[in-house]
């Protein structure tokens, strides 16, 4: 069997097992060193990380592999294990290895497997060193071939992020989760190659300003901040998950900011699962090319059908709409809502998640069926999520789930136009 086929087989194995094949025969002895990707996935032992021994076994495994790896170029380097800043010496050496090997994809996922994630001052601090010719105390990391960077439970400062964008000229994707030090993210300039930016769980963050480059997708999950998206002509996908932290309402600034690049938007996702009573969905700007929209919303939105009418009017080319409502109040103003919406002739797939057979659930489904004249399929997911719902509501539904879903199917089928598929998960 040719060596390149054997290497392809090795690439499908966990790195520990791939290296172990070197003891099989002289043919296999050095084959693993031809792997173009090194993925040190320690998730299977993360529940054992209470033992210092397991942590240092993991570190020793990584050190042993990179010491023996002699291929001049490495495509991917990934680490997933709960390591902290007192392991910095080892992790710095791994990044130095990455720089030397001209890595294109670097992932440092230093999270626990099942822990409640939040920032940690003891997390690893991303280093400030520059190229394989500079000492570790130089100014900034410079990985000239880097295209994708994922940092989770890794502390990054504003200045480090700025320098990374400057000194990694091919960087297209940045993902940062649970970094303590980020406060004001400023990304701008036509020279940037950045296409995808994801920021999650950075509670110290006050603002994100993105402008004048060819960003394609943007994801933000965290506290309400000053968000400004300006002159981003290629931005197609926006996913926002604001967390209120006790704030009773969310500023409609979030809608103002997407209006500047509304023409290019093709996919949009909002997660307002907390009580966002001040949110005015009727302020959503017109999105003439939007094809996919996901909306998670909580609170006592008794006027939600009016909001839904506004959304559909603002998105005339919408084809897929996923809705996850979390409220217990009845829907009102049904007649006014029906009178305020234009029949939608592009929407083909509607997914309603968290359908608990309440009156408001039926009213929502019925309203959607009536106004979507091109509808091909409606998907009802009854138990997708139980957050933000009264315990009594969930308990009552679960006790009578089979009968409730049977009744729901019968009621919906009576109003379902011919040719429209009803799928109840």
Image (tube, grey):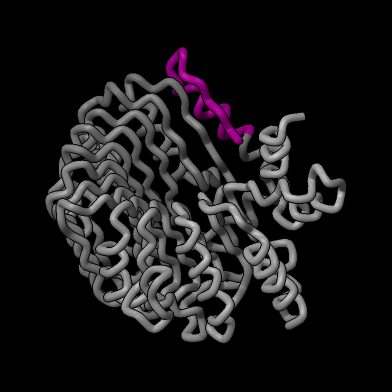
How many numbered marks are there? Answer: 0
- In the visual, does 409 lie left or right of 232? right
Q: Is residue 28 above or below residue 59?
A: above
What residue is rendered at 47% in x and 29% in y? 378
Residues 59 and 52: in front is: 59
What residue is rendered at 51% in x and 21% in y? 421
- In the visual, does 403 lie left or right of 385? right
- Whether residue 301 is visible here, answered yes or no, is no
For residue 365: magenta? no
Q: Quadrant of the C terminus?
A: top right
Residues 310 and 209: in front is: 209
Pinpoint residue 84: horizontal percent, then vertical percent.
56, 80
Pinpoint residue 346: horizontal percent, then vertical percent.
30, 23
Instruction: Looking at this view, name the residue that lies furthest to the right.
Output: 24
Residues 390 and 219: in front is: 219
On the image, which quarter does residue 111 sit in? bottom right
Pinpoint residue 57: horizontal percent, then vertical percent.
74, 73
Q: Which residues are magenta?
A: 406-425
On the image, which quarter does residue 373 sit in? top left
Pinpoint residue 196: horizontal percent, then vertical percent.
34, 51
For residue 421: magenta? yes
Q: Is residue 138 above or below residue 19?
A: below
């Amino acid at each position: 069997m040719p060596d390149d086929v054997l290497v392809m087989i090795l690439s499908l194995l966990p790195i520990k097992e791939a290296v172990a094949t070197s003891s099989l025969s002289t043919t296999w002895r050095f084959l693993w060193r031809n792997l173009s990707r090194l993925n040190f996935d320690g998730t299977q032992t993360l529940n054992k990380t209470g033992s210092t021994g397991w942590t240092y076994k993991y570190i020793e495994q990584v050190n042993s592999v990179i010491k023996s790896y002699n291929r001049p170029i490495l495509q991917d380097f990934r680490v997933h294990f709960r390591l902290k800043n007192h392991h910095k010496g080892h992790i710095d050496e791994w990044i130095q290895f990455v720089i030397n090997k001209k890595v294109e994809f670097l992932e440092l996922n230093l999270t626990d497997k099942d822990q409640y994630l939040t920032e940690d001052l003891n997390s690893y601090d991303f280093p400030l060193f520059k190229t394989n010719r500079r000492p570790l105390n130089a100014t900034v990391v410079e990985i000239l071939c880097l295209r994708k960077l994922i940092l989770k439970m890794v502390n990054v400062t504003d200045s480090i992020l700025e320098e990374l964008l400057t000194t990694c000229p091919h960087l297209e994707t940045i993902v940062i989760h649970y970094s303590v030090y980020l406060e004001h993210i400023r990304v701008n300039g036509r020279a940037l190659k950045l296409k995808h930016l994801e920021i999650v769980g950075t509670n110290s963050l006050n603002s994100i300003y993105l402008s004048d480059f060819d960003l394609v997708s943007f994801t933000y999950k965290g506290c309400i901040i000053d968000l400004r998206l300006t002159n981003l002509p290629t931005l197609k996908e926006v996913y926002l998950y604001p967390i209120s932290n006790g704030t009773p309402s969310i500023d409609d600034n979030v809608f103002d900011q997407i209006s500047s690049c509304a023409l290019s938007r093709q996919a949009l996702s909002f997660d307002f699962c907390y009580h966002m009573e001040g949110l005015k969905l009727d302020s959503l700007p017109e999105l003439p090319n939007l094809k996919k929209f996901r909306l998670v919303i909580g609170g006592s939105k008794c006027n939600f059908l009016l909001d839904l009418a506004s959304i559909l009017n603002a998105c005339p080319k919408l084809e897929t709409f996923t809705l996850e409502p979390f409220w217990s109040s009845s829907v009102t103003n049904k007649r006014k809502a029906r009178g305020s919406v234009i029949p939608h002739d592009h929407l083909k797939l509607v997914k309603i998640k968290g359908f608990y057979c309440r009156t408001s659930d039926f009213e929502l489904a019925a309203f959607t069926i009536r106004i979507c004249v091109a509808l091909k399929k409606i998907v009802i997911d009854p138990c997708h999520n139980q957050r933000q719902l009264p315990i009594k509501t969930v308990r009552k539904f679960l006790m009578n789930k089979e009968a409730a879903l049977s009744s729901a199917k019968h009621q919906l089928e009576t109003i379902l136009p011919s040719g429209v598929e009803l799928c109840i998960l």
